[in-house]
Image: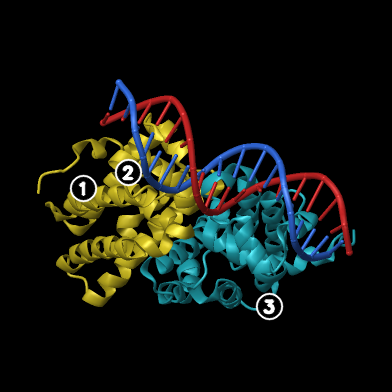
Chain colours: A cyan, B yellow, C blue, D red
Amino acid sequence: MAKQTPAKQSYVPPLLDLFRQYGYDGVSLSKISEATGLGKASLYHHFPGGKDDMVATVLNTLDRWLQETAVDALDREGDALTRLGRMGDRIRDAYSHGEKPCMLASLMLGSAKDNFQPQVKAMLERWMGAIAAVLIQGGMDKALAQERSEEALIAIQGALIMARAMGDAAIFERTMERLPEQICR
Amino acid sequence: MAKQTPAKQSYVPPLLDLFRQYGYDGVSLSKISEATGLGKASLYHHFPGGKDDMVATVLNTLDRWLQETAVDALDREGDALTRLGRMGDRIRDAYSHGEKPCMLASLMLGSAKDNFQPQVKAMLERWMGAIAAVLIQGGMDKALAQERSEEALIAIQGALIMARAMGDAAIFERTMERLPEQICR
DNA sequence: GTCTATAAAAAGATAGAC
DNA sequence: GTCTATCTTTTTATAGAC
């Protein structure tokens, strides 16, 4: 299963940037054209399905990233606190230390919601599952571990919203620093 | 300062519902026309400034609600735990027990962000200030109280996002039940 | 694989009658 | 205060040349 259109991948970063900041409905083809440097017709060449196609491509890339970077950070050596801290570092980079919103959250607003909610849900479930596994491996009760992994994602998502609303990325940074101990407590 | 156009207020509920669920860019005048039963021209009669005008009106109503309902719940008798629980009850109703997103968060995406961020920030600041005041009155250190009030809003916003993404309003309900003790701990 | 040109639909906005 | 009609701009999408 080699990539069918490798070029598509090179447009993911600008697309991610647009969709996470403006949401599905706030992104027009003109904006995309400007951000990618491609004409509208070229965009439809790479993404015949239009915006939906683009979002799906970005989402698949994020899905892979989540597995290969965030979940991977949890699977390496160290105790639970160390592993969660390592994941936190990668998460912080991914969100530009609180400067950029989460695409998964952005997609849950507007006309795109129903279309992408199942995949978003699946991604968040796998993420929570990986966090819970670390806690269980560290000796925590299973039910509690699941509750705590839910708390972790709530804290991340909430901190991103608040940082954006208050115009203060430090809110996110503080939250991420507290996170490992908050979860392992 | 009597109301200049009392009729405007009657359109706030459907407008709130639209903007919180679809965000600024996801709401078109046609949708608004359908939801309110008013023709486009009539909408411009009440809101000469178009969508911006409507959002501003909704935001002002929310601002009043926040003061008269949420903050008011904190100002009544009882210890900190009781007061926070009372506020939580009103907040839960306002978000339909986790079924509906927060308009403040929805506005922080898309083209509307820069326009309304200052007012959103001011509203969240007053809210946090009121929570912190309760904690301080209950004997908590001021700096800690401010940290905890920030945590509270992070939990509320994050729980709303996660509930929506997972299609499970219970996530929000669980979070709100934990909240008073989490904050007073 | 990219472009220009263009079509078709939707969105934002206003004029003017009632 | 509401409507119909109309206008302008923007958006989505496609055809066809290079």
Please indicate whether residue A141 sits to the left or right of residue B101 in the image. Answer: right
> If the image is split into quadrants, where does the C terminus of chain B sit?
bottom left
Q: Is residue A133 above or below residue B19?
A: below
Please indicate whether residue A82 sits to the left or right of residue B160 in the image. Answer: right
Judging by the rendered image, the residue that carries numbered circle 3 is: A77
Judging by the rendered image, the residue that carries numbered circle 1 is: B69
Residue neighbourhood size for the residue with mark 1, other residues' Cα within 10 Å, grouped as few (<14), some (14–19), many (≥20): some
Residue neighbourhood size for the residue with mark 3, other residues' Cα within 10 Å, grouped as few (<14), some (14–19), many (≥20): few
Mark 1 or mark 2: which comes first in sequence?
Answer: 1
Amino acid residing under circle 1: Thr
Q: Is residue A137 above or below residue B1?
A: below
Q: CA distance from mark 3 to mark 1?
A: 50 Å
The residue drawn where x is 42% and y is 61% is: B113
Amino acid residing under circle 3: Glu
Residue A18 seen by the camera = yes
Q: Is label 3 or label 2 in front?
A: 2
